[in-house]
Image (tube, rainbow, N blue to C red):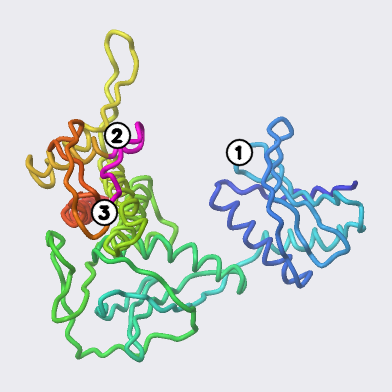
Amino acid sequence: MSATLIPLKTPLSSEAANNRFLRALWASLRAEFGKLAWQESPTRYGPRKVIYFGYADLGLSGLIRIGVTYKRRSIIDCVVFWNVFDKTNLPTDRFERCVRLAESATETEITISAKILVPYGLDFQRVERRGAISIFHHNNVNYLCLRFLAFDEADAAHQFALYTKPILDILSSFTNLFLNLDEYTDLLPPPLDVHRSTFSLNLDWIDGFPIINGMLVIPEQCFALIDAIVCDDLNVQKQQLIDACHHFHAARVLEEQSRNFSSTHSVAAELALVLYVSCLEVLSLINAPPPRTCSTCNQVQYSISARVTEFMEKHHGSVVAQFVRELYTFRSKYLHVGQLLSSRSYTRQAIPQLDSSSTNGTRSTMPMVPLLNLREYTSFCIRAVTHELTEFG
């Protein structure tokens, strides 16, 4: 076995900068060897301060294990190329050339579009921003177009997928819809019609979808959050908001599945409840005061249920806060003690039963969770928190 360690000429100062260097390195290896396929096997050796990503197929006679050494966590000191299987001589000069090229590499601007699958035959209002995102129509199809920086074609495809997943989560949260992307294309937005009317929407709407004049309208605050994703300008609070949007979108997909009678529709409804309430839990954490410490035992006192209830009372009042508090209890019992929300025995005919452990004294054959109401309350809170973050930084 033989290994080559190639030190960086100038260590980079942040995890983001080091990850950018790695993207550039993978692009330079692809260009140099014409191939880079991974058998990922991530491993950290703490005492040696080395992290291995896995085994790379560079078209050589054997796989090369690639990793990095570090002196400070997430700050690369050297790149390691290890000939674990002794099937090839290490092309050390070529490896070093790739490292040096990566250190000085610059990205190019890439534009990629993809079809947005929007349910119920709805269309987005045309959006053309100076920033990273455009939404447009072509042949009665909605398209999402992103402009961003990448090192090569493979890096661009990876970055596009990395950006579009949270972008769809955000768009779902601002429209109450479940969304997906279809085929990628190099189709560019058509010229903008300067005479075409555009409409704006207040963030305090609730119930249904944000439709004005037959089109889905997205507020400026939503696109400001999307720009922050593509520009890598996310602080802790915005990242928490995006995580909450992920829970919302996943819940919305499951809610739709629960409407279709099948052997799994009860499970879909239960999991949708779990994710909607979890979304509210994440939202309530944003800019929340730190938990109190017990004066007697000096232990941190967490009261997540109370925090969520207080958050809901702020945005929806006491009645909705109590409604969500009860759903929070349902979620906890479902997750931690296995209590189901129904007997899961619905066969297109209701058979009411008693259940002394439920709040209303009955056990339904299918979950009776008011998911539509919970969805509306949750998406409203997402928009309200987004407004707070964009207004006050």
Closer to the N terminus: mark 1 or mark 2?
A: 1
In the rendered image, which residue does mark 1 sit on? 73
Amino acid type, callout 2: Lys
Disc 3 on helix, strand or loop? loop
Disc 1 on helix, strand or loop? loop
Please give the name of the residue rendered at 10% of the width and 47% of the height, measured from the top-left corner: 316
Q: In which image quadrant can residue 44 be found? A: top right
Judge whether residue 337 can be spotted in this image: yes
What separation in Å lies between label 3 and label 2 (alpha carbons)? 21 Å
For the stretch drawn in magenta, the main secondary structure is loop
Is residue 296 within the magenta segment? Answer: no
Q: Is residue 186 above or below residue 47?
A: below
Q: Nearer the viewer, residue 160 or 356?
A: 356
What separation in Å lies between label 1 and label 2 (alpha carbons)? 39 Å
Residue 272 lies, in percent from the top left, at 30, 52
Callouts 3 and 1 close, C-beta under 8 Å: no
Amino acid type, callout 1: Arg
Closer to the N terminus: mark 3 or mark 2?
A: 2
Most extreme residue toward the top is 296
Q: Is residue 67 above or below residue 155?
A: above
Q: Nearer the viewer, residue 109 or 86?
A: 86
In the rendered image, which residue does mark 2 sit on? 333
Amino acid type, callout 3: Tyr
The residue stretch that appears in magenta: 331-346
Q: Nearer the viewer, residue 292 or 255?
A: 255
Q: Nearer the viewer, residue 11 or 168?
A: 168
Is residue 335 within the magenta segment? Answer: yes
The label on residue 380 is: none
- Depth-wise, is mark 3 or mark 2 nearer the camera? 3
Please give the name of the residue rendered at 21% of the width and 54% of the height, measured from the top-left corner: 371
Disc 2 on helix, strand or loop? helix
